Amino acid sequence: MNAKRLIPGLFAFVSALAAISAGAQETRLLEPEDLFEIKAVGSPEISPDGAWVAYTVRTTSLEDDSSETRIWMASTADDTVLPMSGPGSSASSPQWSPDGRFLSFLASRNEGRTQVWALDRRGGEARQLTHVEQGVNDFAWSPDASRLALVVRDPEGEYDEPRPWVIDRLQFKRDYAGYLDRRRTHLYVQDIAPGEEHEAVQITSGDYDDSQPAWSPNGRLIAFVSNRTEEPDANSNSDIWVVAADNPDAGATLLQVTTNPGSDYSPAWSPDGSQIAHVTVTEPDLIWYATGHLAVSPAAGGPARVLSARLDRNVGSPRFAPDGETILFVLEDSAERHLASMDTSGENFSRLIDGPLSLRGYSQSDDGQLATLISEPHLPAEVFYGTGAGRRQLTFTNQPWLDELQLAEVENVQFDNPGGTEIEGFLVKPPGFDQTMRYPTLLRIHGGPVAQYDFAFNFEAQLFAANGYLVVMTNPRGSSGYGQDFSHALWANWGVPDTEDVIAGVDHAIEIGYADPDRLGVGGWSYGGILTNYVITKSDRFKGAITGASEVLYRANYGHDHYQRQWEAELGLPWENAEAWERITPFNDVANVVTPTLIMGGEHDWNVPIQNSEQLYQALRRLGVETQLVVYPNEFHGISKPAFQLDRLERYLAWYDKYVKGAQ
């Protein structure tokens, strides 16, 4: 070998290694404050001609303790990206007018209520299209772009002094909304011809809530979703209804399209106006464990055809393709979310976008071009264009931030629970993972319970991994994505099959040599907190636990949280079937807890009220177990104040570091 040729080659190789090393040194590990560096991309809407995709970007300022959402648009032809709404006020729900002339959105400006605004693509400032006194909740363009369908809540009376709440509804409270009165949301139609201010005309009414308006192709009818049973608060029987867009009697005359006793929602018209595609729940007695199927109903009324019954997976957001013979929909399947399609006959099922990813939304142009919102393990959601080999990323909103970071590897795993059922999950490994080492390990449990960990970017798991933890995330029985029977296995049996499955995930991580069995932690929020409560009453293996927004003493929550209908369906009335309630209540086994436990929640959470967290804290404190109770003022089920979000992450790390790692 020629030494003179080898030495320059060796020099070039060493130089390349040095460059790679220098580049690697420029990256850093994730920190709690990075949560506020992420720009949340959402709501992709492709223009009718397919030339542009509008979308939202939410930014958060820790310094100002606030967030703001703006509208942007990206060209599908090149890398042009343009801001469409300015700073200073948030905007949401971007929609193109059917003629492509206007980009419209919802915004609250000048200290007013939320209204519909529109930007003319030819230039100029945004024009306010609606002037509804109580504001607008949602809207949809008519096919000829001359009118808007509006979703508007009944006005609230104005009083000089505070008045008591007078409650007479069966469902009398809701998280974020508070106590519920008889004000309802109804449909209105407004002409938007320029030059004069038009009044919105109410086209539905009654003691019911109406939502999800969808115009018929000829612009004469509007389909919508409403539960118009005798007692809407007692069931989940929403149906698809149709009302004339120029209805003169405020909705006294309606056509009921679906008659299924379960939920029917997300209506979408066929191009010829003869059919309406929608999601249907055919087994409503199973409440949230039931699968949502794809269905088609005659627009004039008649029996629905369930197209996806053999699929046994949840579907969402159905839309007809331009050919009128194919329906597109989002498919949730085994820790993935895909874009799929099926003929109106129920045949020729295919996946247009699949693989290890999480598709969070999509829209299509007049000729069927597709814009999608996709997240992957190392990619917060971004806008993509096209399908198959031609699919390409349009937005790179978070790329500068991602380029700074050394992210954790995410490994998708399958393992058997003690009974032989296959369970799926993810192992998030600390950056620089060394397979010869065993790491302190955190079992993190998702909410729901009918939800799933999927291939989306997970900031929390990445943060724990950046701090030296192996993170175990499982989809136990009760989770969605694996069929109705898999979800329904949890029925009236909380804390039994799901506890087995999440513990099996930890055992798998130990068996393959990743996890240190002497340094284990557990935690989660909402149902993740509830299942944490079961885990620590059944096992002493965990050195530290964090239970957030959880329940522990179920009968105490009847009439206090907002799930009375679901509780009754699953467990019966608490005074008639007390045994069923008490059998699954983890509070009854609280004396078994030895794990130091951090308990957290929002002061005004009516989804999972702080009351149970207080009771758990009181019990552990009385038992002498290391514990703290952290209550976030004026917060609901989700913690929204940026300063509190940071506080929560810092407390997570401090608690686990102290009790799992044993750090001082």
Image (cartoon, grey):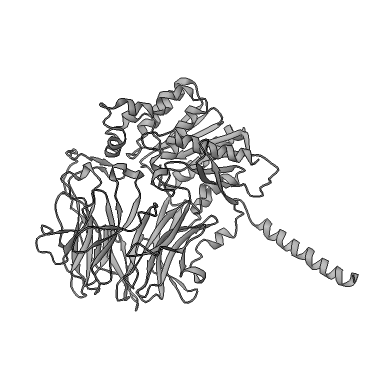
User: Residue 312: horizontal and vertical position, in percent?
Assistant: 39, 51
* The residue positioned farthest toward the bottom in the image shown: 122
Foreground residue, 35 or 579?
Answer: 579
Residue 264 seen from this side:
yes
Q: Name the image quarter holding residue 629.
A: top left
Instruction: Say left or right for 211 vs 52.
Output: left
Q: Is residue 144 positioned above or below 458 on the image?
A: below
Instruction: Say left or right for 522 vs 124.
Output: right
Foreground residue, 53 or 156?
Answer: 53
Q: Is residue 330 positioned above or below 598 on the image?
A: below
Q: Which image quarter holds the C terminus?
A: top right
Q: Name the image quarter holding residue 630.
A: top left
Q: How many marks?
A: 0
User: Residue 567: horizontal and vertical position, in percent?
Assistant: 30, 36
* The residue positioned farthest toward the left in the image shown: 249
User: Residue 169: horizontal and vertical position, in percent?
Assistant: 18, 40
Residue 43 seen from this side:
no
User: Residue 128: horizontal and vertical position, in percent?
Assistant: 26, 67
Q: Is residue 199 positioned above or below 357 on the image?
A: below
Q: Image point 53% across, 52% down: which residue? A: 34
Q: Image point 29% across, 67% down: which residue? A: 117
